[in-house]
Image (tube, helix red, strand yellow):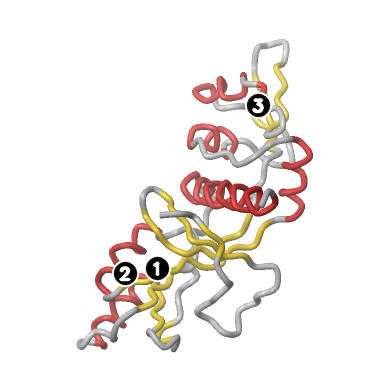
């Protein structure tokens, strides 16, 4: 499947649409449409420093272990991450005379996930695709066919998992839950970086056409 830009289409008609982008994404072999808002400040900072998307879980774990506005001790098991020159724009690192390494995270999330949508012929198939994306953002199944015969059970199940349902005629049957983890974790950050990587590829491709 080719990653490609799509018109912005949200399940919630009253959602704040200005500044939103949407593309057909592939992450860990799962296909879906993702709507997001790029952080202009972080995007411009990365562009000026020549820093693209950071998709290494280990690098993100090392960064996440650092405080953002003050110095903190670097986790010894992840200290080698900051030996690479490519991390100079991601964190401020200081080695003191006692051979203790201190650091402060400079990198921030490049975008905000607004909605993740999966189109499926059945509720069961859509649920299987979107359920593993829990904690990454609001999730929606857009049904290509009819609603399940046992509509009550499907709505109960969707509500339990926090998944929204939109009918084939674009009726919002059930609004999605918030969907994002309370804590900012490596998995959630890596997801935004992969989406950002695809955004960079798409915008670069369009600028050369």
Q: Quadrant of residue 94?
A: top right
The residue under the point 39% across, 76% down is 142
Which residue position holds label 1? 118
The residue under the point 65% across, 54% down is 206
Q: Position of residue 131 (x, y in %)?
A: 34, 63
User: Which badge, 3 or 1, comes first in the chain's sequence?
Assistant: 3
Image depth: mark 3 or mark 1 in front: 1
Q: Residues within 10 Å of mark 2 (few under 14, many from 20)?
A: many
Q: Is residue 38 above or below residue 172?
A: above
Q: Is residue 148 above or below residue 67?
A: below
Marks 3 and 1: CB-CB under 8 Å?
no
Q: Is residue 14 left or right of residue 121?
A: right
Q: Secondary structure at mark 3?
A: helix
The Cα–Cα distance between marks 1 and 2, rounded to whole angstroms, is 6 Å
Which residue position holds label 3? 86
The residue under the point 64% across, 40% down is 52
In the foreground, 71 or 106: 106
Which quadrant does the N terminus fall into?
Answer: bottom left
Which residue position holds label 2? 126
Q: Position of residue 115 (x, y in %)?
A: 51, 68
Q: Secondary structure at mark 2?
A: helix
Q: Position of residue 167 (x, y in %)?
A: 38, 85
Furthest residue in direction front, as rendered: 209
Q: Is residue 90 above or below residue 99?
A: below
User: Which badge, 1 or 2, comes first in the chain's sequence?
Assistant: 1
Marks 1 and 2: CB-CB under 8 Å?
yes
Number of disc labels: 3
User: Which badge, 2 or 3, comes first in the chain's sequence?
Assistant: 3
């Amino acid at each position: 499947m080719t990653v490609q830009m799509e018109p912005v289409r949200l399940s919630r008609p009253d959602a704040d649409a200005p500044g939103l982008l949407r593309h057909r994404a592939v992450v860990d072999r799962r296909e879906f449409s993702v709507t997001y808002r790029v952080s202009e400040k972080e995007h411009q900072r990365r562009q000026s420093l020549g820093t693209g998307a950071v998709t290494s879980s280990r690098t993100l774990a090392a960064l996440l272990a650092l405080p953002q506005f003050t110095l903190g001790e670097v986790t010894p098991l992840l200290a080698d991450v900051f030996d690479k020159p490519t991390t100079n724009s991601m964190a401020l690192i200081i080695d003191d005379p006692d051979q203790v390494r201190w650091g402060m995270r400079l990198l921030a999330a490049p975008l905000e996930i607004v909605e993740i949508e999966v189109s499926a012929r059945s509720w069961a198939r859509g649920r299987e695709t979107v359920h593993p994306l829990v904690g990454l953002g609001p999730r929606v199944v857009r049904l290509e066919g009819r609603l399940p015969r046992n509509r009550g059970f499907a709505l109960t199940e969707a509500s339990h998992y926090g998944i929204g349902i939109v009918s084939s005629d674009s009726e919002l049957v059930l609004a999605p839950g918030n969907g994002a983890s309370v804590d900012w974790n490596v998995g959630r950050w890596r997801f935004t970086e992969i989406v950002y990587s695809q955004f960079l590829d798409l915008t670069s491709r369009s600028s050369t056409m």
